[in-house]
Image (tube, rainbow, N blue to C red):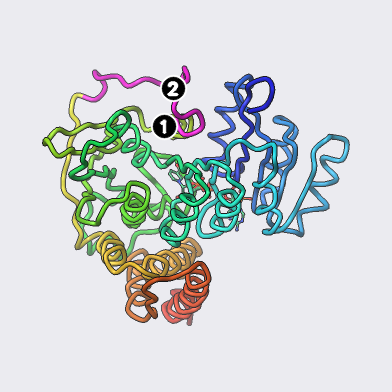
Amino acid sequence: MNRQGTKNIAIMGSTGSIGTQALDIVRAHPDLLQAEVLTAQNNADLLIKQALEFEPNCVAIADKSKYGYVKEALQKHDIKVYAGADALCQVVQMDTIDLVLAAIVGIAGLNSTIAAIKAGKPVALANKETLVVAGAFVTALAKEKGVNIYPVDSEHSAVFQCLAGEYGNKVEKIILTASGGPFRERDKASLASVTKADALKHPNWTMGAKITIDSATMMNKGLEIIEAGWLFALKPEQIEVVIHPQSIIHSLVQFHDGSIKAQMGMPDMRIPIQYALFYPNRIASSFPRFDFGAYPKLTFELPDTEKFRALTLAREAMKTGGTMPCVLNAANEVAVDAFLKDRISFLQIAEVVESCMMKGAQVDKPGLEDFLNCDTETRRTAERLCLQTDTRQP
Ligand code: NDP
């Protein structure tokens, strides 16, 4: 905190869906939050616009070719400008930062999150891929540095909120809710021909493209199972998934006396983001409130793991452990990107992931280097598989 009691935050990925919603919260609480660092991959125009509005200490853009453009736009302002992936790891370590919001998408968010933890900065974690890929390394490092990781994902925030005040009470299992995505009611055969536009239509949430496709395949829930395992020290069999199409109950915790606690609210990511930014305090908000009259029924069903193969693959990867979740994640990132570029079909996403898991060399007690090598190697394999199945090839 600075002298006025304002929390200085670094928003990694400020131009994304989570990043812009975090800035909505900063905008609503200028007396409590200051955006000290803002970063983007290549959306220079939005980064400049954000910098002019929020006047951070510095901005960093990962794409070095955009440096001159951003620098020129901000030259009359007292805002430092950096560029390149390494710069992201340096800006999170600045002395003035009180908390880092890790909201870069994919493994691209791993290094800056590790850098933040190394510098002893508390992390509000949206970037689930960090824990999926290198959960063992990241959680051990956070423990060693005494750094708290606050979940931002709505399901994990829900579990975290249910656990408040339960210290020492045994958790039997947690139940992660899933909307079921846009294809919940379709049969598997019909998924062969769904388009990118169909898959990008999430029924309840507006999110970045990658996580929206992950929600359609249900890989997102698979990644969340692995993320929950690391965040709450749970075994795979202690993490259940239930489809809850209304997305009002964000997740549940069942204790060893049989009691279940659930956390509810509107599907609005600003609620868990704000909780992570201000934990343990709840700050008044003007977000839309839940109306019981508008939701006469909250319904639940079990997921169809035959249709949503990705969910089964993620569970298998978690059970295998070692570098297997890293293989799962890297193959999925490549396959989703290929799907978004119309290179492979929807059902081929899980096929590419499964093939990579079958081919991937397994390292049982991996260090960071092993994770990074595994990521590079798997991406190569997945790229080859996508090329072989490229629907645009003659
Ligand atoms: P978006 O795609 O909307 O935003 C991603 C952000 O990361 C952008 O600022 C983007 O910059 C930046 N970025 C992308 N690639 C790189 C890179 N190689 N180097 C540096 N920065 C990069 O993603 P979301 O906000 O939807 O998701 C962010 C994370 O939060 C993901 O891990 C997701 O799983 C998780 N999450 C998201 C939720 C949501 O509601 N959106 C809900 C729960 C979790 P640019 O704009 O310049 O491309």
Give the main secondary structure, helix, strand or loop, of the magenta stretch.
loop
Q: Are marks 1 and 2 in contact (CB under 8 Å)?
A: no
Instruction: Specify the amino acid type for callout 1.
Output: Asp
The crowding category of the residue bearing disc 1, from other C-alpha atoms within 10 Å (few below 14, some 14 to 19, many at least 20), is: some
From the image, state whether disc 1 or disc 2 is nearer to you.
2
- Residue 27 visible, this orientation: yes
The residue depicted at 50 percent of the width and 28 percent of the height is 278
Measured Cα–Cα span from mark 1 to mark 2:
15 Å
Q: Judge whether residue 308 is colored magenta.
A: no
Q: Is residue 7 above or below residue 172?
A: above
Q: Which mark is residue 268?
A: 1
**Quarter in which the N terminus is drawn:** top right
Residue 347 image point, x, y percent = 32, 66
Range drawn in magenta: 275-295
Instruction: Specify the amino acid type for callout 2.
Output: Arg
Q: Nearer the viewer, residue 154 or 259?
A: 259
Q: Which mark is residue 282?
A: 2
Q: Is 86 left or right of 22, judged from the image as shown?
A: right
Residue 321: quarter of image? bottom left
Q: Is 360 left or right of 284, judged from the image as shown?
A: left
The residue depicted at 31 percent of the width and 48 percent of the height is 181
Q: Nearer the viewer, residue 323 or 70?
A: 323
Q: Is residue 136 above or below residue 16?
A: below
